[in-house]
Image: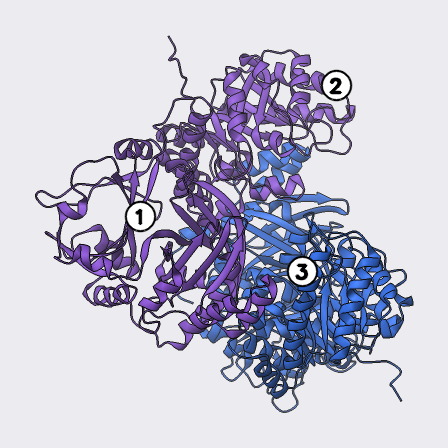
Chain colours: A blue, B purple
């Protein structure tokens, strides 16, 4: 008996991955795919026979459910018919050798193709008949930019009319959703005629559908299309075949194939669950950021400790068994980890002083970990001493750790269990500068990694992707997309830049990859906070005077407010939610900087002033002597 | 008295260049611009007063003809009017301090803007009146995506209706041409009301006009818009003010500002001449490639000499005074230059064995050089010995030399004057493999340099840019755009790749920049040529067998032809012009490779088989042991 909820085989088209054909097969197998669609050009460029490909795939435990594409077959003028059938027979030879049972025929794009579904049905019936003689199948798919057959329902009409058991329909989410075509009726297609389902997402873009499809597809969960509803319609139709990814993406073509394949399988597992397949443990309900952990050595730890003190933090304790210090202020916990035998030490070795872990409060840490595991994340358990708490952690795609801390846990906090708290730990916090929480943290990524991190945060943690902002750094454009939890208490803007000369680009270069480069602390009274700190010690960023002339004129601010902003070097913005006051520090070792924010209902992240910040930081980072990491 | 042909001042908006405001000003001045438009955000981010900017510009000899933009002013609901006028007054303060006589007001994009030209005219008249009191001017420009005023004629109607001497029209080629708007009527706008002209080109793209404008503008001559006709219309109207570039381009934001500024001024000089301004010497009429010069040392020279011999070349002579060898076959001359005190030696030091110069046959070398000089190119004269010929050369943007050789020159050829020709030099060529000419040479470029080289070839040499091709390398996409002379005898495909792992990307990385990486020799009988050479010695590239199965099925080739292709490892393509047979070699030191082509009327460059070549070369380059350069 079949299980109540069917687990579909997971497949990926070789065109989705970078490399030679054997490298593509290896990457798909390593990620855990069940099968691959062989994209014709990958076979052509492979210096070996189709039987060799079959052997390699079998060795790797991969099925080959589909060979694709076969183009411009149906409804051609009569003189092309015989040649097209001969062409099909030669491809059937290849498929037999390859062990691929099905060929994907995509609808004709030729200008001379005839607009006659009956004729198309005749041609496809003939092809199916020839395929059936060899035990092969033909799947017909509507291309969104075909000459006549652009919508799935037209393709289905042709398949229905041809009425041959070896001919069925192939659905592709991109071709359907890019045209805004209806999903209605898909669930009514007989399951045995639904031969194959290809899935792809894409960001919404206003460009011609062919260019959009060829360059900008991405994995389900990375884009803006309603891929979940599409997959659900196919599943509702009773489809039991592979869920397969066919992604044409310029960046995927160049990226390491194993990383791409892992993201692909993660996206399919998530999608299947969202579309009514085997359920995943629910995404965590977040309670905010509990702590931020920096990897440091002795020297950087001292220096960063000083910087934190200058912002009103106090050293609140020392770890019971490790070279780890705790700094606190209001609800903010910052851990400086200089322990040699630790994940932090590895992180420091690769990246210098930098954020190596975040502690997130969740409703159920075990459930959160189980979800992450099901979505192919690596788990991490730090070595602990006696009586110390073991906190489960998830490794992000760049190796950063997300510790998941049970909010409901009624026992002692990790700070009480693991740290020797200083006598003044509660009192000292009261003498701080009024910082109360971590408002948001921004992560810089190499440009081609943005989609990968969007997928991680969206699927594993259930964060939502906000609209992309573009910010002009003096040395290039920076794109920023915030991932935000439904309760708004986890906010992670992701920043990328094609230029290595921008603030983001310099960080990615210096840091050797992605990382947290921007940490914003919240205060309810930024003016008050700034009177508590010494701007020079805290390395507060200088704001050019021209800014105040402009913001005053632009937003019509009254003279008193403008004078206060100018005197305290505050930046100002407002949106539908309310007002926003903020101030930045200079970067610490060109790696990260702090921001102090007062958010009076404001919803954004101060993007209006980010360009100014980048210009000022570019100057600040240039005028300071370079320091070794 | 004015000169008959007016030379317009040349200006550039600071947003077009990378860097801080002082860096932008410096780059504009270094290129030779007369003035800069100050883009507001550049001033805001500058940590100094507007008077400081005025001083720096004056020191650099730059005028500031325009301050821009002032947004969302006209036709707002009544309650915004007073605030908008206050905002204008504050900007006038800035302009006075800056010494900018004119502000650019772009048409309102706000949803609440009122659709009433009379109201817009009232508002702009009031603004012009306030400006006039300070001796300032207001220019009004239609934004292509504004709420109501999108076309230049609407903006002109409003200016005409406002009828104030301090108010005039600003034209921007992008806003007009992107909408396909008519130029008719521009020449009839009174010259004194045409306050300013901004020029930008762009590649044709099917996307929303706002994104297109913000990210993909480029310099006149780099894109597909009819900027020349636009400039001509403005000049015909009697406009004598600056021709100014306003370019929003993601790559320009990140590129070195001096390079961008030089390209910008080159584009304006060319455009002004094309649009009826001061004429440039005519572009050369090419007679084909005369020679190809490789920079080598003794070791690489020996090795490359062997490779050339394996392709049927013979050493035909030695330079009279330098360590330079001449190889010849048919009409192909190849120079291997190992001379220490030469441009080739500098080239070798930077790039290893590689093409350092091309000799091009032209109708008039002195005229060609004069044109190049007028378009800001550097000239080069190589040190010569007694009785040797001095050939003038132009340095390309990457330093490569283009020698220009007078075809009409009735004297001795450079080979006769400069080389001691071997006794067999004529006879030996007869024993070659039938190569008769250089068919085309392809150049690999870093991706952000493509526009720069398109501009160089288009303006200096008068080559035409063909359509962009995209080719899938196993490790990423390669884009290729051929520059072709009107007579088709100079063909230079330009290749770029965002991925550093593709054939093009590997070349750019290894070569430290751009360079010739692909040299195609022509033969009238490729089969015959291949029987004359030893495939292993010539390092001919192996073609996977699957290719022949596919090309046979795809193009319906007969079995005899297919068998011949397979046996001789030939590639095949055809187009409207005719058939094409070709074969590649493996790369020489991962730097360049040769191609042998038989072009029977065929018009293209074998792009259909380029993906296969890239896959095979990726494997070949991996399986050979790395050799030092």
Q: What element carries label 2?
A: helix
Residue furthest out toward the bottom:
A386
Res B138 visible: yes
CA distance separating discs 2 and 3: 46 Å
Q: Can residue A365 be seen in this view?
A: no
The spot of residue A250 in percent (x, y) is 58, 60
Q: Is residue B354 left or right of residue A97?
A: left
Where residue A520 sits in the image (x, y, percent)? Answer: 63, 58
Secondary structure beneath dot 1 equals: loop
* Residue depicted at 30% across the width and 55% down the height: B355
Please provide percent x and percent y for residue A536: 49, 53
Residue B335 placement: quadrant: bottom left
Is label 1 or label 2 in front? Answer: 1
Mark 3 surroundings: few (<14), some (14-19) or many (≥20) residues within 10 A: many
B79 vs B235, nearest the viewer: B235
Q: Earlier in the sequence, mark 1 or mark 2?
A: 2
User: How far is the residue under mark 3 from the one under mark 1?
Assistant: 39 Å
The residue labelled by disc 1 is B399
Quadrant location of the C terminus of chain B in the rendered image:
bottom left
Q: Residue under mark 3: which chain is it in?
A: A
Above or below B4: residue A383: below
- What residue is pinned by disc 3? A217
Q: Nearer the viewer, residue A528 or B66?
A: B66
Give the Cα separation between the discs numbered 1 and 2. Answer: 56 Å
Residue under label 2: B119
At horizontal 44% and vertical 51% (from top left) the residue drawn is B494
Q: Which of B574 and A380 is in front in this view?
A: B574
The chain ID associated with circle 2 is B
Against B379, residue A292 (above or below) is: below
């Amino acid at each position: 008996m079949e299980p109540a909820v069917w687990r579909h085989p997971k497949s990926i088209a070789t065109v989705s991955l970078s490399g030679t054909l054997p490298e593509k097969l290896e990457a798909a197998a390593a990620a855990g795919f069940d099968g691959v669609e062989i994209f014709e050009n990958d076979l052509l460029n492979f210096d070996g026979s189709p039987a060799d490909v079959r052997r390699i795939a079998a060795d790797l435990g991969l099925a080959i459910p589909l060979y694709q594409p076969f183009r411009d077959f149906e409804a051609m003028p009569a003189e092309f018919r015989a040649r097209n059938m001969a062409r099909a027979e030669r491809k059937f030879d290849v498929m037999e050798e390859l062990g691929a049972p099905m060929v994907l025929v995509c609808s004709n794009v030729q200008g001379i193709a005839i607009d006659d579904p009956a004729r198309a049905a005749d041609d496809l019936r003939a092809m199916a008949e020839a395929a059936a003689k060899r035990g092969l199948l033909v799947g017909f798919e509507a291309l969104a930019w075909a000459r006549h057959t652009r919508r799935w329902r037209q393709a289905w009409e042709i398949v229905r009319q041809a009425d041959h058991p070896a001919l069925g329909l192939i659905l592709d989410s991109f071709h359907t959703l890019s045209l805004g075509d209806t999903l209605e009726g898909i669930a009514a297609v007989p399951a045995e005629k639904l031969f194959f389902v290809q899935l792809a997402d894409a960001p919404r873009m206003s460009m011609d559908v062919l260019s959009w499809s060829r360059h900008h597809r991405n994995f389900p969960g990375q884009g803006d299309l309603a891929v979940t509803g599409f997959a659900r319609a196919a599943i509702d139709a009773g489809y039991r075949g592979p869920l397969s990814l066919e992604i044409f993406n310029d960046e995927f073509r160049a990226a390491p194939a194993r990383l791409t394949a892992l993201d692909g399988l993660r996206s399919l597992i998530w999608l299947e669950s969202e579309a009514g397949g085997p359920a995943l443990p629910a995404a965590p309900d977040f309670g905010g950021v509990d702590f931020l952990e920096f990897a440091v050595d002795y020297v950087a730890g001292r220096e960063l400790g000083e910087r934190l003190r200058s912002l009103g933090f106090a050293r609140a304790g020392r770890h019971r068994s490790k070279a780890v210090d705790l700094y606190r202020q209001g609800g903010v916990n910052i851990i400086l980890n200089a322990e040699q035998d630790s994940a932090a030490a590895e992180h420091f070795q690769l990246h210098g002083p930098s954020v190596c872990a975040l502690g997130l409060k969740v409703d159920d840490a075990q459930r959160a970990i189980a979800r992450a595991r099901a979505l192919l994340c690596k788990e991490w358990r730090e070595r602990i001493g006696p009586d110390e708490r073991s906190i489960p952690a998830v490794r992000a795609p760049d190796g950063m750790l997300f510790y998941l801390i049970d909010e409901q846990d009624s026992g002692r906090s990790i700070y009480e269990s693991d740290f020797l708290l200083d006598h003044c730990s509660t009192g000292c916090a009261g003498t701080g500068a009024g910082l109360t929480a971590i408002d948001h943290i921004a992560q810089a990524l190499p440009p081609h990694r943005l989609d990968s991190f969007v997928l991680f945060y969206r699927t594993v943690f259930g964060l939502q992707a906000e609209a992309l902002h573009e910010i002009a750094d003096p040395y290039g454009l920076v794109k920023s997309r915030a991932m935000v939890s439904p309760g708004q208490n986890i906010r992670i803007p992701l920043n990328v830049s094609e230029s290595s000369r921008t603030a983001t680009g310099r960080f990615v270069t210096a840091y050797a990859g992605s990382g947290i480069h921007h940490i914003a602390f919240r205060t309810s009274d930024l003016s008050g906070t700034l009177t508590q700190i010494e701007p020079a010690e805290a390395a507060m960023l200088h704001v050019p005077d021209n800014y105040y002339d402009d913001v005053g004129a632009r937003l019509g601010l009254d003279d008193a407010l403008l004078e206060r902003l100018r005197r305290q070097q505050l930046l100002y913005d407002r949106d539908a939610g309310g007002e926003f006051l903020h101030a930045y520090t200079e970067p610490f070792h060109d790696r990260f900087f702090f921001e102090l924010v007062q958010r009076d209902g404001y919803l954004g992240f101060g993007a209006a002033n980010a360009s100014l910040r980048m210009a000022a930081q570019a100057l600040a980072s240039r005028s300071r002597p370079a320091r070794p990491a």
